[in-house]
């Protein structure tokens, strides 16, 4: 059971970006502006429908994605970034730039680690 003493709002916000799918969904919505569920599902082919549903609901709960339902038969549902979601995109792009800049070193370090060599030895 969580108490207010051990509740860390920063950790709960950052947890959103540690999952496998949230950043991919946000970037697809940034690129395409408005998307329907099946469009998102096609652009991220290795995500299951269930995981896409969970990810979209979570992003909606965090006010990063807006869901709009049209009263049609069958119902049409569209997703798009909110203003808060758009404000996050430059930070994601900075992270992507960092990853691209350090990709070779990270891959080399992983290979060394798998071979039993450590590339980094912390002092503490």
Image (cartoon, rainbow, N blue to C red):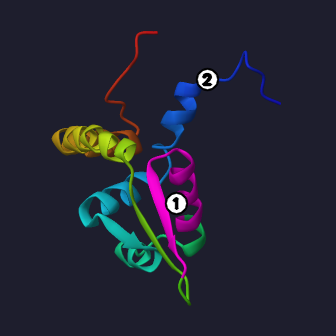
Residue 23: percent from left, percent from top: 39, 52
Residue at 60% from the left image edge and 70% from the top image edge: 50
Looking at the image, the residue that sits furthest to the left is 101
Residue 14: percent from left, percent from top: 48, 35
Residue at 55% from the left image edge and 74% from the top image edge: 49
| Nearer to us in this view, 68 or 114 | 68
Rendered image quadrant of residue 51: bottom right
Rendered image quadrant of residue 41: bottom left
Which stretch is magenta?
Answer: 52-71
Looking at the image, the residue that sits furthest to the top is 124
Find disc 1 in the rendering and name its residue: 56
Looking at the image, the residue that sits furthest to the front is 71
Residue at 46% from the left image edge and 9% from the top image edge: 124
Q: Is 24 on the left-hand or right-hand side of 9?
A: left
| Nearer to us in this view, 64 or 90 | 64
Find disc 2 in the rendering and name its residue: 8
The mark lying in front, picked from 1 and 2, is 1
Residue at 44% from the left image edge and 48% from the top image edge: 64
| Mark nearer the N terminus (1 vs 2) | 2
Residue 7 bears which disc, if any? none
Residue 119: percent from left, percent from top: 31, 29
Looking at the image, the residue that sits furthest to the right is 1
Placement of 52 over or under 86, stated as above or below: below
Q: Is 124 on the left-hand or right-hand side of 32?
A: right
Rendered image quadrant of residue 101: top left
């Amino acid at each position: 059971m969580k108490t207010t003493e051990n509740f860390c709002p920063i950790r709960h916000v950052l947890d959103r970006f540690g999952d496998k799918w949230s950043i991919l969904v946000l970037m697809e919505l940034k690129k395409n502006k408005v998307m329907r569920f099946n469009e998102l599902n096609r652009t991220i082919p290795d995500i299951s429908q269930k995981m896409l549903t969970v990810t979209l609901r979570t992003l909606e709960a965090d006010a990063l994605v807006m869901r709009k339902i049209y009263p049609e038969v069958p119902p049409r549902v569209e997703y798009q970034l909110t203003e808060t979601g758009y404000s996050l995109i430059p930070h994601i792009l900075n992270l992507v730039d960092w990853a691209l800049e350090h990709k070779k070193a990270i891959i080399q370090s992983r290979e060394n680690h798998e071979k039993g060599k450590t590339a980094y030895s912390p002092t503490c």
